[in-house]
Image (tube, rainbow, N blue to C red):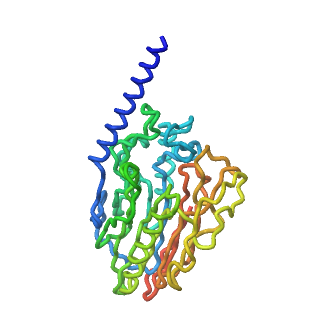
Amino acid sequence: MIKNSFKFLGLIFLSWLLYISLVLIYGTATDFQPAAKLPLKAIQKNKSLNLTDSIVNLISWNIGYAGLGAASNFFYDNENAFFFSYGKMVVSPKENVDRNIAGITNYVETSDADFYLFQEIDLNSKRSYYTDQLALLAKTKPSFQATMGINYNVGYVPVPVLEPWNAYGQAVSGLGSLSRFHPTEATRFQLPGSFDWPDNVFQLDRCAAVLRFPTPAGKELIVANIHNSAYDTNGTLKSQQMDFLREMFLAEYEKGNYIIAGGDWNQCPPSFKYDSFKDQNIPPSEETNIAGDFFPEGWQWVYDANVPTNRRMQDTYVKGETFTTVIDFFLVSPNVEALEIKGIDLDFQFSDHQPVFLKAKLLGFEGGKRQIVIN
């Protein structure tokens, strides 16, 4: 009887070992390795509408693939999540995802901005039940250009590895952008740095999605959609990515161009205390700050210090208890004046992030004075 038990356990172990071996072989063979520079895929095209106004309005929002709303927790934000889910959600129930994407699309449809910068927007993923989320959002703004920069393209993510029946599965996701104006160029720039093998096979391939628009000033407006690395414990990857972005943006500014970069930076803005909101369950410091002198004088990190943009996902959201902070914000060049910044407090109903609105003025020319009302 004992001998048979050992045989059974040995068979289970060998089966699991074969499963992991096949996953590693498949993942390595199909590893997404994009070129350093690629044109962004146009999901929806608009008519050739040119930017004529000196005032532009942007909303940035990490929508968390509509799977990380207030009613959800996430297994990977807990210790030892690589092996077990410990009863946490690997994939949120479909009713949660459906409710979240309905709330997200409703907000976008009823809001008014010139640019929408979305992070973690799915095209074809198990975690969002294989819904093309950018197509849904693009339909709310049928006259806008919609582009997609893929930063997550994995055929099968095996975590938690000791629960193969509960695996994360396929993930195709990235940076989706909606623009009222027609860009002359839309480009995906691969950001440097990666995890070691085999982690790199199943992790995101971080990128910046960059749109270029001519202006009446004779210079271009550069709008960049940003999502830097997470789960980067020593900050090495974020540091490489930030150096790359700084070099790119400074080069564009030297040409006289306007730069507005927004998104989920996965770090706090300079001088912002990560525990500013005094939630009851404050973890040890996990968020780093961007250095105050990272960009030359005149560049501005623009954020709303009064509204949190991100929450912890160890458990479902409880206002006043769940830890929150600010990691979603904008960077503007010295020739751009930030007129208004506003975190949109949706009480984390639909995502573990909240949208952020920026109203900015491009200096050096005058345009119309469109009024934008933010809900």
Q: Is residue 270 above or below residue 166?
A: below
Q: Nearer the viewer, residue 148 or 24?
A: 24
Question: Residue at position x 43%, y 76% from top?
Answer: 246
Instruction: Tell which residue pokes out farthest to the bottom in this image.
Output: 364
Q: Does residue 327 show up?
A: yes
State which quarter of the image contains the C terminus. Answer: bottom right
Question: Residue at position x 70%, y 55% from top?
Answer: 279
Q: Is residue 18 above or below residue 137?
A: above
Q: Nearer the viewer, residue 248 or 224?
A: 248
On the rendered structure, is 81 left or right of 226?
right
The percent position of residue 49, horizontal first and vertical second, equals 32, 72
Instruction: Tell which residue pokes out farthest to the front in this image.
Output: 3
Question: Residue at position x 59%, y 63% from top?
Answer: 326
On the rendered structure, is 270 left or right of 332?
right
Residue 267 location, quadrant? bottom right
Question: Residue at position x 47%, y 41% from top?
Answer: 98
Instruction: Tell which residue pokes out farthest to the top in this image.
Output: 1
The percent position of residue 287, horizontal first and vertical second, equals 59, 62
On the rendered structure, is 114 left or right of 304?
left
